[in-house]
Image (cartoon, rainbow, N blue to C red):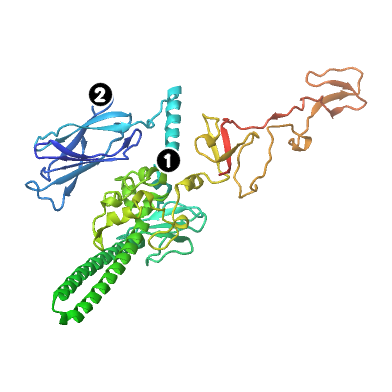
Amino acid sequence: MIYFANASGAVVHCVPERVFQGASEGNKIFLVAPFAPNESVSAVFRLPNGESTRPYLLTYEGKIAGDAAEAGGLCGWSADLPAAVTADYGTVTAQFVCAESGVVTSAVMFTVERGVRGELPAAPSEDAYAEITAAISALAADVMNGYYAARAVYAWRDTAVYGANEIVFYAEDGKRGVFLRSLQSNNGEPPFTAEGALNAAYWAEAADFDGIYAASLEAAADAAAAQASAEQAQDSAVSAQTLAGQAAASAQTASAQAQASAASADAALQSSAAAAASAQEALEALKDITEIAGGEYALQSDLQKLIDGTQKAGAALVADSAVNAEYAAGADAAQNAANVTGSIGGKAISSIFESDGVTAKAAAKAAGDGSGNNIAATYVKKTDLIDLVYPIGVIVENYADDRSPAQYIGGSWAQITDDRFLINTGGAYSLGATGGEAAHALTANEMPAHTHTVPVTTSNTASGNSPNYPFLHHADSGVYNTESSSAGGGAAHNNLPPYRAVSRWRRIAG
């Protein structure tokens, strides 16, 4: 969020940003004002529950270049939005306080949208579970509706490991960046070498936005040049027609010259028509690039807006949400065919489009981009997001909901009900192997080797007694061993570790 204040502290403008409950330090708050650079600026917040926070000191960011609206220019201060501010949802009021000058800005308000509390109680209540379930359902709906399309592709990080065919965005210094596809499993290699060459053994280039941008500029330049050529040819045609009229009005002896001028006029008109056709082709080429926003794909030039949060993703990424040019990316430049200015062959461009029944709403969806790449093979579709996050074979566990994930994610799922634990493959166990048992009765071979000794005292006399051992009559005196009686029932024992039962589903089809 960016707030602009004047020298007296009145907030005159705001650039808002969506803030969600539980987003700990996930947002920044900026103040731009004509205060002195050495001013210590703090922010104080009144929370939805009515409590006020301590002052949070903002960091001085420097002067705003190129601004001379106020004496001394504008300066900027910023701070991460504290976690205490987003702990609960509701309306938050903020004020900025200047320590040196004593200026206190006017109060500003923003809304913390409902999400999940950062800290749940030790024993969550039914309301807490309902809140979590509602938040997950809302996120699932947003993903299905394309509101988080940009998050299907993450920026490459040197600490991450990527799977085969996983798509990442790589931001090159001084460039617009590229989409890259991992060629290996457990891929932790950098996409580019120290010399700047693509690490082709591990990564493949999916889309180069510098190339796409250059193609769009080239198409726009071609359209502008063709338009200028058409206008010049039209001027030439008018001049030639004027000369032909003057020659016709001259003496009968100049009729040959008049006929030559008329022929020149016809040639100029033909040149004008050819230039107009060239302009139309250039405009169609440009439309093929910009029309991507009207289909099922994101316009690549809008990627940075999606990443930095200045444009919502959902409203311009799917055909259902962009039925005409008013909602497509770049609508400010051409909301529909009637708003395009200029002329071809003396006719307004809008009248040419309308006379042919062509408007922005009726334009056919482009099959390729400006570089000739097939859109379906090059770009990620919204409908593929679920397959990227939940591929066939993935297992989903739920502690509180026994419903099939098909109801809130999509696809076909089979519930796993065979009462088995999971163990990883790669060692003694192969994929799909089963084993083990819930209860087990020990066999003789599974018992530790042991004996039972019962000492007895014998005597060769007919009578006698021992306080410690059974007394037996035997011909020879001495100590002998005898077997004890059997014990134990041989029942099976519980063979399970401590467990918690959850709902487990495996995705089996799209």
* Tags 2 and 1 touching, CB below 8 Å: no
Label 1 sits on a secondary structure element that is loop
Q: Amino acid at mark 1?
A: Asn
Q: Is residue 29 above or below residue 468?
A: below
Farthest residue to the front: give it: 252
Q: Which mark is residue 418?
A: none
Of residues 278 and 166, the one drawn nearer to the viewer in this rendering: 278
Residue 231, image quadrant? bottom left
Q: Position of residue 504 (x, y in %)?
A: 57, 35
Farthest residue to the left: give it: 71
Q: Position of residue 396 (x, y in %)?
A: 54, 38
Circle 2 packing at 10 Å, graded few (<14), some (14-19), many (20+), is few
Of residues 51 and 455, the one drawn nearer to the viewer in this rendering: 51
Q: Amino acid at mark 2?
A: Gly
Q: Which mark is residue 145?
A: 1
Q: Is residue 21 above or below residue 174?
A: above
> Circle 2 sits on which residue?
50
Marked residue nearer the N-terminal end (2 or 1)? 2
Q: Position of residue 289 (x, y in %)?
A: 36, 57
Residue shown at 26% from the left, 51% from the top? 339
Label 2 sits on a secondary structure element that is loop
Residue 208 seen by the camera: yes
- Position of 178 with respect to 463 (left or right) is left
**Label 2, label 1: how many angstroms apart (C-alpha)?**
36 Å
Residue shown at 65% from the left, 35% from the top? 418
Q: Is residue 297 above or below residue 261?
A: above
Of residues 202 and 338, the one drawn nearer to the viewer in this rendering: 338
Residue 214 seen by the camera: no
Q: Position of residue 155 (x, y in %)?
A: 39, 51
Which image quarter holds the C terminus? top right
